[in-house]
Image (tube, rainbow, N blue to C red):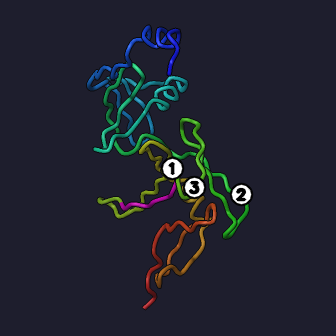
Amino acid sequence: MKSSGQAARHQGRPAKKAPQDCGDLGLRIDRGGGWFYHGSPIDRKEMVCLFAGMLRRHDDGSYWLETEDETGTIEVDDVPFLAVELFTFSCGRDQVVSFRTNVDELVTVDDDHPLRVAECPDTGEPLPYVYLRDGLEARLARPVYYELVARGVEEKVGGDDLYGVWSSGIFFPLGRLSDSD
């Protein structure tokens, strides 16, 4: 049971209200990880990093900037971030793979932050991604992907010959090895 002093303190607080929906904020993130406001580039990295910390992806796939008081949608061409640097520790099955993003976020590839490789519908080229947080992913920059591929190994998984990398004790396939018939 609360004392009358505790009850009085809680009664003085305003009720927490839902953030105001501001609709489309006029922000866009291009395929290269560049941020734009009404078509003009946002060149201040500190501002981009601040916005990146407020970015969320909803279950319907839409991207939102969310603060305690306001929320609004933004347009994202592919994914909001780009993995621009690769770090590896150890090798083989003991290897640990980490990436630094264009907003200086660090992520280690593991069960909670898996790698996935999609295929470009136009060219058939691999499109590698790593999961960050809150439904957000980073696409690996091409040089980073090539560096990752160089760390890869062949593994037989469920009867399939795969090529991929080990990280945090888990094998992450990058692709199938073609049959040699």
Magenta highlight on residue 96: no
Residues rendered magenta in the picture: 113-119
Residue 132 image position (x, y, % from top left): 50, 46
Q: Is residue 28 above or below residue 79?
A: above
**Quarter of the view holding residue 24:** top left
Q: Is residue 34 above or below residue 44?
A: below
Q: Answer few, some or many: residues within 10 Å of disc 3's Cα (few below 14, many 20 plus, some between 14 and 19).
A: many
Between residues 111 and 115, which one lies in front from this camera angle?
Answer: 111
Main SS class of the magenta portion in the image: strand
Image side of residue 6 versus residue 16, left or right: right
Q: Quadrant of the C terminus?
A: bottom left
Q: Which residue is mark 2?
A: 89
Q: Is residue 174 above or below residue 12?
A: below
| Alpha carbon separation for disc pair 3 and 2 | 12 Å
Amino acid type, residue under disc 2 in the picture: Phe
Number of the front mark, 2 or 1: 2
